[in-house]
Amino acid sequence: MNQGLSRWLPFEWIAALRFLREGWMQTIFILAGVAMGVAVIVFMSALLTGIQTNFLHRVLNAQAHIVLQPPDEVARPLWAATGAFADTALQAPAQRLRSVDQWRKIAEQARAMPEIAVVSPLASGAAIAVRGDASRSVTLFGVEPGTYFQIVKLPDNIVAGQIRLNSDDVIIGTDLAQDLGVAVGEKLRVTSGIGTDVILTVTAIFDLGNRSVNERNAYIALRTAQSLLNLPGGVTNLYIAIHDPYAAEILAQTIAGMSGMRADSWIRTNQQFFTAVNAQTLTNTVIRLAVAISVGLGIASVLVVSVVQRSREIGILRAMGARRGQILRVFLIQGGVLGLLGSFIGSALAAGALVGFHAVSRQADGSELFPLILDPLLFLAAAVLAALTGILAAFSPSMRAARMDPVVAIRG
Amino acid sequence: MVSGAVVSGTVADAKVVAGEVLRLDGVRKAYNPGTPQAVEVLHGIDLLLRRGEFCALIGPSGSGKSTLLNLIGLLDRPTAGKLFLQGQETGLLDDAALTRLRGRSIGFVFQNHNLISAFTAAENVMMPLLLDRGWPDAAMRRAAEALLDHVGLLRWKDSMVGNLSGGQQQRVAVARALAMSPVLVLADEPTGNLDTKSADDVFTLLREMNLAGGTTFLIVTHDPRLAARCDRIVEVVDGRIVADAPSGYSAARGGADIRTTG
């Protein structure tokens, strides 16, 4: 008998748990409320994090973290001997396809930097791909497969053929292949802007999940590109991958300062994405805060009612020797337990919803909308925050109970 | 000042009456003191309760009985005067010490039993021991079972108190009041909500407990029939003790300490 009462379990815990059990209807309703709140918070957090992670993964696997290219050519005014402008009319110059000056030296310097993982030279320019009567404008990417494919994970997105880039090979996207009616092993003619042309064999077809990329990008060997674009030994860009992608902008500025090159980080080129991420994060934070406040108010209201309902019992407990601090803790514990239990149930609901949503939601290309990441830290944080919210919410009713005059309380 | 034989000096006061459990010297109680709305409800109460007394506190509604009981129960503090419990002046104690003294020395029985509904009968009886801390589980259980056995409710020990009848609940409350073996039990209309038979049973039980353990009982009642069964009757009217005399029942039993104050 009386297994519930033991000197090893403090009175506060026993009373708190018994009160919750006795008012089981209230307890169930508020637990459901807390659980729903926690479920919304956990689900939204996991979903948003997953979608952002997925998007980042896609972006970071399809482009360099930093792209180095020659600075834009600018027209300089002609100075007169007197120091005044000889001619104030300036015409913006056309940007020629130029090689990065001393690119090998710059690449070596970059490779020596500890933050940098991979440097890959690239010769890129416009061309026309022709097969039979069909022709399409394309962007040629002359690459060194060994380094380039460490930055852009093209091999992961090959849908036909095999990755191979010898001097007369080309890898094209699914949409270009369809437009030109070309398959793996078949040939097409590529003519550059300066009129040189070459016959290339399609060795693989990729699908990067982006129609314009699949229509326009054509990957060939670096030397072939240099020849086609009239850049003997030269490259138009240096692609750089770094260990910490979020340090790209700072590092880009450092490299630009060192080399005099133009350095664009993926952060700058995807500015809209970051704006969207920030807006999403802010919205998510506001929603989570509102839900957390609702949960806290729910717990507080239930405990306020409980304190009123139990005022006589509080009075008699005080008369029997219960200290104010003990009464305070009885209700604080109830708040904490409601928050904690609610968070367990809510986390389970959120996990179930995430699994279900992950199973049914797909991107346009059929791939998963977001990676299913059930991070234990997220659930732990939810539990801790919910328990703290419960305790915080319980504070006011608990103080009311603790301050209750036993005489008044017993009289009811 | 109360009368009585001075036997020794103790904790806080040099003059302690032999067998003294409770002493009130010129106790006054005012609500909203120091304000224009100040109302004094007790006007200099002197009272002495000795070990083993079974005393009734009577008086009309609004006479100050409940206020006096709250002061004696250390649930409230007097505005003036001194209150001694076992020779210790309670006015010198802080809230925590007062709470501790109350828990260990005074048992309460209320009109509405005021049991904790979330606990069983035995757990309610064990509650004062649990609050006192340090009691081994087995000792708490033994004490609760012995008391429930004494009040005839051992077979109901594991019942939630809400499932017991009014009379049974009040008997559980009596057992709980005695759990800490207090020197003083205060009962505020303990039979007020019971039918005649249950009221008689509970009163008899209180009396048995008093005779068996030597615990002092102070019982507030409106029922002259029950008051007459006490050793002593103290009557309060308009915040003053107007009569303090042995009852006929007590006289028939051979008498007890008889004093008249006020």
Image: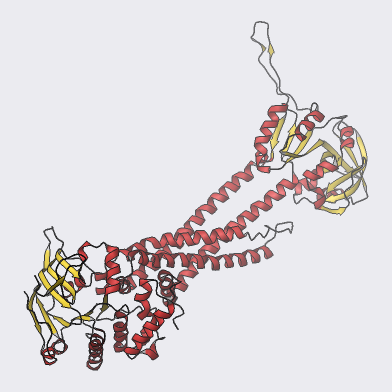
- Quadrant for residue B125, please give it: bottom left
* Residue A250 at x, y percent in the picture: 65, 35
Name the one closer to the observer, B7 or A331. B7
* Residue B87 at x, y percent in the picture: 20, 70
Instruction: Work out whether A13 lies above or below A293.
Output: below
Name the one closer to the observer, B74 or A26. B74
- Quadrant for residue A328, please give it: bottom left
Q: So how many labels did they put on this image?
A: 0
Instruction: Work out whether B249 lies above or below B126.
Output: below
* Residue B42 at x, y percent in the picture: 11, 69
Of all residues, the one furthest to the front in this rendering is B8
For this view, does A138 lie left or right of residue B110? Answer: right
Instruction: Work out whether B22 lies above or below A228.
Output: below
For this view, does A139 lie left or right of residue B146? Answer: right
* Residue A229 at x, y percent in the picture: 86, 32
Q: State the residue at coordinates (16%, 86%).
A: B230
